[in-house]
């Protein structure tokens, strides 16, 4: 298997042992940090004799990094990966998963929408023998109706197109056994649609219900355009149905054209030549032109992604680390 060209674990081995790793991607989260650590640390102290909180600073511009370093001075179990720039949540999460050394790894958001208290339940299920324990949002009351409706539509479409069911209403908040994390790290692709990859690796999975709260502070950086592109990444990353669709669409259009041609020939033989036909010609030309452009666009979506993968660029770049390897 071909590994990804850069993996933080190769040059910054994480040396301090930890049973549980919590991985937190952070982009401009300075306003929630104090509450975040105040809620997460007691939970981890209670459930594990050793733990690490791996904070991946995803190119924040608001002083998240100095705030994180202050917390690290207080509690050395807080380790920090400072990415070279903003790479996006999936990439930040990948960096954190690469560096994490816990027997169990728990990715979670910094904004406390994922209640840390649930970690105790995750660990309980893990000890029962499950490899993956994911959080299932019982209600999405904190999301707007439009976001809920589009999310439902996305899950339906994704599960239809990919034969790879991702459980509805789950996010990245979950516990993964070390074996699962190693499997994920060995996936070579740069398109890190984590929800899909989590499901792709399989293993014994189970869910735990929870209520998703509103963001503790700060604001979400996910607008609809970003979500739309995220959805495209997800679908193109796991399904080729959109590509194959055009063979069938082409067959249907060709068949219809054949039937219509037969009709025109017979009508001309019976009724003679009939010149007016501008409107129908235009309709057919425009329709076919549109269909061809759409299919080219779909091919382009895949080609573009193929191009990104072919360049073999790293998924993320690390600026500095605090608490890993020799840095600090
Ligand atoms: N995040 C990140 N990089 C980004 C955008 C977001 O690391 O470019 C982090 C963010 O700090 C948070 C998590 O991803 O910990 C989820 O982001 P957010 O709460 O904005 O998304 P939502 O909950 O609305 O889906
Ligand atoms: Mg959030």
Image (spheres, rainbow, N blue to C red):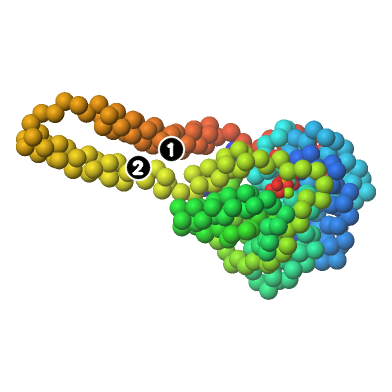
**Residue found farthest to the right:** 74
Counting labels gives 2
Q: Name the residue under label 1.
A: 298
Question: Which circle marks residue 284 in the picture?
Answer: none
- Answer yes or no: do the residues labelled 1 and 2 have beta carbons within 8 Å? yes
Q: In the rendering, at what x and y percent does residue 117 appear?
A: 80, 63
Closer to the camera in the image, 5 or 69: 69
Give me the C-alpha separation between circle 1 and circle 2.
9 Å
Q: First in sequence, mark 1 or 2: give its number.
A: 2
Q: Is residue 30 left or right of residue 230?
A: right
Q: Which of the 4 image quarters holds residue 291? A: top left
Q: Is residue 156 at least partly visible in the picture? A: yes
Q: Is residue 301 left or right of residue 113?
A: left
Q: In the rendering, at what x and y percent does residue 69 appear?
A: 88, 41
**Residue found farthest to the bottom:** 128
Label 2 CA crowd tier, 10 Å (few <14, some 14–19, many 20+):
some
Closer to the camera in the image, 69 or 148: 148
Q: Which residue is drawn at 10% across and 28% down?
A: 273
Q: Is residue 161 left or right of residue 282?
A: right
Closer to the camera in the image, 321 or 109: 109
Q: Which of the 4 image quarters holds residue 44? A: bottom right
Q: In the rendering, at what x and y percent does residue 170 appear?
A: 64, 58
Q: Mark 2 points at which residue?
A: 246
Q: Mark 1: which secondary structure?
A: helix
**Above or below — where is 18 with respect to 79?**
below
Q: Residue at x 28, y 33 (%)?
A: 284
**Above or below — where is 319 with respect to 56?**
above
Label 1 CA crowd tier, 10 Å (few <14, some 14–19, many 20+):
some
Q: In the rendering, at what x and y percent does residue 155 appear?
A: 54, 54
**Mark 2 CB near ligand 1 (8 Å cut):** no
Q: Residue at x 60, y 66 (%)?
A: 205
């Amino acid at each position: 298997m071909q590994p990804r060209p850069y993996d933080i674990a190769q040059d910054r081995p994480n040396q301090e042992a930890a049973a549980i790793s919590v991985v937190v991607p952070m982009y401009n989260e300075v306003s929630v940090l104090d509450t975040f650590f105040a809620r997460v640390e007691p939970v981890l102290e209670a459930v594990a004799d050793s733990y690490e909180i791996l904070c991946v600073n995803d190119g924040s511009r608001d002083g998240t990094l100095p705030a994180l370093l202050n917390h690290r001075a207080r509690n050395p179990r807080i380790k920090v990966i400072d990415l070279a720039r903003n790479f996006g949540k999936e990439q930040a999460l990948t960096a954190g998963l690469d560096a994490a050394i816990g027997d169990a790894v728990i990715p979670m958001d910094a904004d406390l929408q994922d209640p840390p208290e649930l970690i105790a339940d995750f660990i309980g299920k893990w000890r029962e023998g499950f490899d993956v324990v994911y959080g299932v949002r019982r209600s999405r009351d904190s999301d707007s109706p439009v976001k809920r409706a589009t999310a439902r539509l996305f899950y339906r479409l994704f599960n239809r197109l990919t034969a790879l069911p991702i459980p509805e209403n789950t996010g990245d908040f979950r516990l993964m056994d070390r074996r699962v994390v190693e499997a994920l790290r060995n996936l070579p692709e740069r398109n890190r649609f984590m929800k899909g990859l989590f499901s792709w690796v399989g293993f014994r999975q189970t869910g735990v219900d929870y209520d998703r709260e509103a963001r503790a502070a700060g604001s979400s950086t996910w607008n609809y355009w970003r979500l739309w592109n995220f959805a495209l990444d997800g679908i193109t990353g796991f399904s080729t149905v959109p590509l194959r669709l055009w063979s069938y669409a082409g067959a249907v259009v060709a068949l219809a054209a054949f039937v219509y041609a037969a009709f025109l020939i017979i009508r001309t033989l019976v009724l003679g030549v009939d010149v007016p036909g501008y409107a129908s010609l235009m309709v057919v030309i425009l329709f076919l032109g549109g269909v061809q452009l759409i299919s080219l666009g779909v091919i382009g979506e895949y080609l573009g992604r193929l191009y990104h993968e072919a360049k073999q660029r790293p998924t993320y770049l690390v600026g500095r680390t605090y608490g890993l390897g020799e840095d600090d």
